[in-house]
Structures are given as structure tokens and as C-alpha cells.
Image (tube, helix red, strand yellow):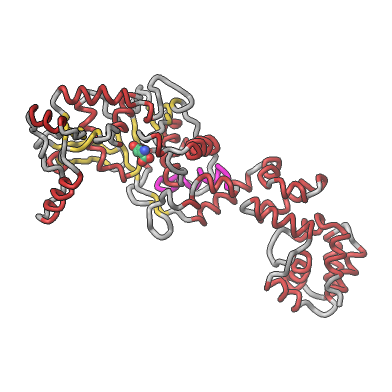
């Protein structure tokens, strides 16, 4: 790879929201391009504009930018290989179709879907892999004219050279070999005139100067056909690498239908880009240290040789782990913004810093920050079961002792707790839990010292008072 400029790409279609599986592919391509100081390109696939949605397109652009996966060429950015939207490239494909037909490497096929289905059935019944039986491969010019005169629109089939083998070195999976005779002549233009996916995908990569395609292994079986096409039109074949799919916890491949795992949904809920990038970069790729990595270090440690051939399993708990790591590193000002307006409305300006640091380690999402702001500034909505237990278990006189300690040291938690300890002759859990439960309605959460400071004498008094019976 010396001297050659690497160009990678991400080629989503704008028919649905990006899910974590798609975006992992984008991330790997981006990391690879950055690592080798190459270029990363974005192309919007899909020859049928009607199936695209503006929302999906806008959202996928926002998602990529939000994750920091900026592209150097392509959709909305430009470059020498445009247009970067497949639906605007129809005229370009026409040239290749013509070229292939002139060379006898593609032919019109008038087979009807029902006929093809029958042939497939017969082949399967005979224990053979289904492939096109070659019905239209040798039609005479008269036959073609006759079909056309009947108004039948043909598809265009690529003529696969018999007897040969397609070999390529997959940059993830190593040597691959496919027998042409197993492939069968395949459709490169549908009878409605639209381009078949693997045709435009291959032509576009070549015309856009993509040197390396890294994509899901669900495309592995397309690759020999794409190599055949590019060889036939004398365009450069990129290196292909196929990564194992991402499975969910149930072992199913992530899909667009799993809406909750869309990048958009995670962004809306308050997951941080660094958390998502750290989680995804380790799904099917290994780093030496299982520690949070800044984006520069994710780039530095990336290598195609570290991509795994085994499927990776995504677990929400992993994402949450990286989210906590990312939150831990986020600047206070950014955390404040992240928490959102409802939190900012509740927390007084003067308490902002203290609030942020008090809850930083106890939140995963802005909704958790809001829950704490509500508990602190509005009061616990209700007691959790363990909290009411802790209160019921408190020593008789506990809350009187606490109120008395508070009256003496309203602004000093350490002296308050020392006095409470002396007043009630308790220690450890039995000293702290009833207090925490009475103040917050829960038995977990930020440091008591921080809560004490945030609540202030008046709220502290009121909350303890309600347990003086
Ligand atoms: N649009 C295709 C997909 O999203 C691109 C496949 C590829 O990367 O070649 O599956």
C-alpha cells in the first residue's frame, strides 16, 4: 500500500434510519481512512428516488456529523467523482450498459418472473443451486425483435464467462474463490430500466476512485459479480473486505426495524458520540487496552488486521459502560448543556457547578439528571421500597437526633454527621441510610455531603421534619 492514496467510503441508502450496525461500517471506513491519511467518501445509494425519504437523508447526514465522521468527498461536499447520489447517476450507467452489450458481455432477457421461478424450483428439486438457466443467452436478433414488437421490456443480463474462477484477497477474510459456473448470468438492469444494486455500487466505487471497500459480510456473495462487471468494463477493482455482522443480544443481525437502536434514537436520548464510537470500534475490532479512547487513539489503534471474522454481539450494557466513561470526561459546561432545559430551569445558577459534580457519576442520560434535579429541588416523589424499609428500620429518635444535629450545623456536613452519630449511637449503613432515604426517597445516589450542600438548611429541615412523629 506504499504511496497509494487510500479512499474508503460509506454508501448508505436513504430509505431508513442508520442503526448501529450501519454506522459501525461507517466508523471503520472513517478510522481506516484517517489512519492512513486517505480520504473518506459518502455516497447515497438507491436508484429509486421514490423510496428515499428526506427525513432519512437529513438524519443520516446529521448522525454522521454528530459522531464526528466527517467525509472528505461526496454528498454535499463534492469532489471529482460526483454526482454522489445514485439516483442522479442513471446516465453514467447507460454508458456501461451499452459498452457491455456491444462487446456481447450482456444481453436482453425476456424471461418472465413466473418462468424464472419455475426454473428455480426445478433446479432446487434436482438438488442443484438455482441459477439462471441461460434461456435468453443466445437469442437471435429476430427473436429479440419479436419480443420487443410484443411490447415486452427486457432486463439486461451479464454474461458470466463459463469455466473460470474469480479469486480475490479479502482484506478481512483472506483468500476467496468463487466458481463462475455457480454464479449464473445475472441481471444488471431490471426490466423497468433501473440499475441493479451491485452493478451501480461497483461502477460507482470504481468511477469515484474508491480503493478500499469495507462492508458487511452480507455483501460477500455480491463481490465476485462486482469484480466480473468491473473487469468487463475495464474499470479498476477496489480491494474488498467483509466484516462480520453485528448481532443483537438475541443473536439476530441488527436491522432497520430495531428502531430503538437507530443512531437517531440514541442521540435523542442523550447518548454521547464518544460513547457510541468507543462501543462500536470494539464490536468486531480489537484494541489493546479496554479503556476509553479519544478519537485520535481510536484512529491510531485501528487496523484492518484487527477486524474479526466472527460476528460481534452488541449489548446495551456495553454502550452504557462507555457512556459512563464518556460522561466522566465531559467538561462541566458541556454536561450542563447535555442535561437539557428542564434541568437548567430547576437548578439555581449558584448551585450549578455543585449539582453537576454531585450527580456526574450517578447519571447515564439527561433523564437521570432531571430525576435528580426533581428530587433535590422539588422533593422525592415517593419512597422506593428499600428507602421506606430504611426509614422503618431507623432507630427510635433517629430523626429527632438528625434535626437537632442539623439545627447546630446547618452548613457543615462533617460536623452534622459527627453530631448525628453521637446523638443516635449508630454507624455505617444504619447511620447513613435513613438519612439518605428521608432526603431523597432512594437508597442510592450522589454523595450525602454533596446532597447536604445542594439541599440547603431549609429543605433539609423540612424533609427531616416529616419523619418526626
Ligand atoms: N447501500 C449498500 C448497503 O447499505 C452498500 C453496500 C456496500 O457497502 O457496498 O448495504
Residue 351 falls inside the magenta stretch: no
Q: What stretch is highlighted in magenta?
A: 271-287
* 239 sits left or right of 400 in the view: left
Residue 305 visible in the displayed image: no
* 36 sits left or right of 389 in the view: left
Q: What is the residue that sits farthest to the top in this orientation?
A: 80
Q: Quadrant of the C terminus?
A: bottom right
Q: What is the residue that sits farthest to the right in this orientation?
A: 408
Residue 281 falls inside the magenta stretch: yes
The location of residue 212, given as percent across then percent down, is 34, 32
Query: Which of the four quarters of the rendered structure image does ligand 1 lie in?
Result: top left
Q: Residue at x 15, y 42 (%)?
A: 132
Q: Quadrant of the N terminus?
A: top left
- Dividing the picture into quarters, in which one does residue 459 lie? bottom right
Look at the picture and state if 68 lies above or below 312.
above
Image mark count: 0
The location of residue 348, given as percent across then percent down, is 81, 48
Q: Which residue is drawn at 32% across and 33% down?
A: 201
Which is more toward the observer, 20 or 421?
Answer: 20
Which is more toward the observer, 131 or 348?
Answer: 131
* 360 sits left or right of 59 in the view: right
Q: Residue at x 55, y 46 (%)?
A: 275
- Dividing the picture into quarters, in which one does residue 78 lie? top left
Q: What is the residue that sits farthest to the bottom in this orientation?
A: 396
Q: Residue at x 35, y 28 (%)?
A: 210
The location of residue 455, given as percent across then percent down, is 82, 57
The location of residue 101, given as percent across then percent down, is 17, 25
Amino acid at each position: 500500500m506504499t504511496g497509494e492514496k487510500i479512499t474508503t467510503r460509506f454508501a448508505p441508502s436513504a430509505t431508513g434510519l442508520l442503526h448501529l450496525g450501519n454506522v459501525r461500517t461507517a466508523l471503520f471506513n472513517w478510522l481506516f481512512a484517517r489512519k492512513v491519511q486517505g480520504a473518506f467518501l459518502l455516497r447515497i445509494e438507491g436508484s429509486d428516488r421514490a423510496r428515499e425519504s428526506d427525513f432519512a437523508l437529513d438524519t443520516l447526514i446529521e448522525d454522521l456529523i454528530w459522531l464526528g465522521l466527517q467525509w472528505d468527498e461526496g454528498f454535499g461536499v463534492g469532489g471529482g467523482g460526483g454526482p454522489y447520489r445514485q439516483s442522479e447517476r442513471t446516465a453514467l450507467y447507460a454508458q456501461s450498459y451499452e459498452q457491455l452489450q456491444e462487446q456481447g458481455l450482456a444481453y436482453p432477457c425476456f424471461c418472465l418472473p413466473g418462468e424464472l421461478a419455475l426454473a428455480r424450483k426445478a433446479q432446487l428439486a434436482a438438488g442443484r443451486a438455482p441459477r439462471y438457466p441461460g434461456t435468453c443467452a443466445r437469442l437471435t436478433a429476430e427473436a429479440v425483435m419479436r419480443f420487443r414488437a410484443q411490447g415486452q421490456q427486457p432486463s439486461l443480463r451479464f454474461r458470466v464467462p463459463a469455466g473460470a474462477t474469480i479469486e480475490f484477497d479479502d482484506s478481512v477474510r483472506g483468500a476467496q474463490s468463487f466458481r463462475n459456473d455457480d454464479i449464473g448470468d445475472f441481471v444488471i438492469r431490471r426490466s423497468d430500466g433501473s440499475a441493479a444494486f451491485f452493478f451501480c455500487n461497483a461502477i460507482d466505487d470504481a468511477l469515484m476512485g474508491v480503493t478500499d471497500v469495507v462492508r458487511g459480510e452480507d455483501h460477500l456473495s455480491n463481490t465476485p459479480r462486482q469484480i466480473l462487471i468491473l473487469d468487463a468494463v475495464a474499470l479498476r477493482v477496489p480491494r474488498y473486505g467483509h466484516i462480520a455482522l453485528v448481532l443483537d443480544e438475541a443473536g439476530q443481525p441488527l436491522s432497520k426495524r430495531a428502531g430503538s437502536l437507530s443512531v437517531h434514537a440514541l442521540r435523542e436520548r442523550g447518548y454521547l458520540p464518544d460513547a457510541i464510537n468507543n462501543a462500536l470500534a470494539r464490536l468486531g475490532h480489537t484494541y489493546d487496552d479496554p479503556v476509553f479512547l479519544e478519537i485520535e487513539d481510536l484512529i491510531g489503534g485501528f487496523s484492518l488486521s484487527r477486524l474479526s471474522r466472527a460476528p460481534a454481539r452488541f449489548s446495551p450494557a456495553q454502550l452504557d459502560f462507555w457512556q459512563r466513561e464518556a460522561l466522566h470526561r465531559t467538561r462541566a459546561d458541556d454536561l450542563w448543556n447535555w442535561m437539557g432545559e428542564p434541568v437548567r430551569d430547576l437548578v439555581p445558577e449558584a448551585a450549578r457547578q455543585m449539582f453537576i459534580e454531585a450527580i456526574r457519576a450517578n447519571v447515564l442520560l439527561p433523564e437521570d439528571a432531571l430525576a435528580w434535579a426533581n428530587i433535590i429541588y422539588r422533593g422525592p416523589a415517593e419512597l422506593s421500597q428499600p428507602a421506606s424499609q430504611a426509614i422503618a428500620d431507623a432507630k427510635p429518635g433517629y430523626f429527632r437526633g438528625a434535626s437537632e444535629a442539623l439545627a447546630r450545623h446547618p452548613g457543615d456536613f462533617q460536623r452534622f454527621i459527627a453530631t448525628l452519630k453521637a446523638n443516635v449511637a449508630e454507624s455505617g449503613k444504619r447511620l447513613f441510610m435513613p438519612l439518605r432515604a428521608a432526603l431523597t426517597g432512594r437508597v442510592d445516589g450522589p454523595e450525602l455531603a454533596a446532597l447536604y450542600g445542594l439541599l440547603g438548611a431549609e429543605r433539609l429541615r423540612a424533609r427531616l421534619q416529616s419523619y418526626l412523629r
